[in-house]
Amino acid sequence: MRGWRDNALVGYGVVTGLAGTGDSPTNRTTRQALANVFSQFNLTVAPEQVQSRNVAVVMVTAALPTFAREGDTLDIAVTSAGDARSLVGGSLLMTPLKAANGRVYALAQGPLSVGGYRYDANGNVVQKNHPTVGSVPSGATVEVGVTAQIVNADQNVTFVLAEPDYTTANRIAAAINRQLGSGLAKARDAAGIEIHVPDANREQLVNYLTQIENVMVEPDRRAKVVINERTGTVVSGGDVRISKVAISHGDLKISIATQNTASQPLIIGRGGADVRTAIVTNSRVDVDEQNGPGYLAPNNDTVADLVESLAKLKTNTRDIISILRAIKAAGALHAELVVQ
């Protein structure tokens, strides 16, 4: 519904209990933060006297969902803000989490769960994943609840589509009017359907919204092909069509090898003043061009058939991505191409 959204929370905290993998003693932010923590317990310690590597300054983030109530718990993410090497084994001290308006909505605290590690000794380092990022499941408690306005001043409720589409919005409005009463729903745009709440249903608003959620509608599906060049992933609907197109894909490899040799002059007796050692550079360029597979796609073929055929020709995934982008540029791919 319109107005329903998660609210971002962020806080600044301290992680303790690290086994010498925390921030370095030269980090002034960490020393000041730990001195501030001590001052809350009537301990007066100057920041210059803090020399611990078992402490790290971190940033804490969370998402406050719609209709969150006091006492609900939130999952939090903890990231190092200093020069700590690892947060493994640490515990987050109580950290207030604020929203964009500067108000505290939750308090975070608890032991960290880190999906990695880092150990180093004598210049040798063994590391897995990112040990400076951790999480605390249900590590924050909501202190201030959130209420969202469902019905506006005109006694209307606006449903917002996750994927805006005019056809889907029109189908939803027609289905609601057909099942719940004529003239109740109206599609305002591709993303919003405005639904009137009758006087008889205002006291039982939840029941009325439940009836609306159970209205069966077949959404209009737009054809998409999603490719990820970083991981070499291609995801497509099985029925995404391509027009008749000829494909020829080649592979050009260029290798440049450079060899440096020193030319030492043969000295008999005493060399002249202009005799110097010279560095001679020899470069070799090798060009290897392989004939790529040729393929002719018939009419009404699908992307799934094309990928299957290219896989049989032993075409790697990154070449398939390049071919799909070229087919889209040629106007033969009847789908939206999403590049991640």
Image (cartoon, rainbow, N blue to C red):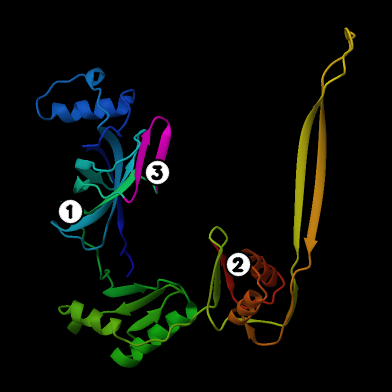
Who is closer to the viewer here, 301 or 19?
Answer: 19
Q: Can residue 169 be seen in the rendering of this structure?
A: yes
Identify the image quadrant of residue 299: bottom right
SS label for mark 2: helix
Residue labelled with disc 1: 142
Does residue 1 appear to the left or right of 287 in the view shown? left
Which residues make up the magenta segment?
Answer: 115-128
What's the amino acid at mark 1?
Answer: Val
CA separation, marks 3 and 2? 29 Å
Number of other residues with Cα within 10 Å of mark 1, as a class: few under 14, some 14 to 19, many 20 or more = many
Instruction: Report the quarter where the N terminus lies.
Output: bottom left
| x then y, percent, for residue 130 | 38, 46
Identify the image quadrant of residue 274: top right
Residue labelled with disc 3: 127
| x then y, percent, for residue 275 | 88, 14
Q: Earlier in the sequence, mark 1 or mark 2?
A: 1
Q: Earlier in the sequence, mark 1 or mark 3?
A: 3
CA separation, marks 1 and 3? 35 Å
Residue drawn at x 81%, y 47% is: 285
Residue drawn at x 40%, y 73% is: 161
* Residue 317 badge: 2
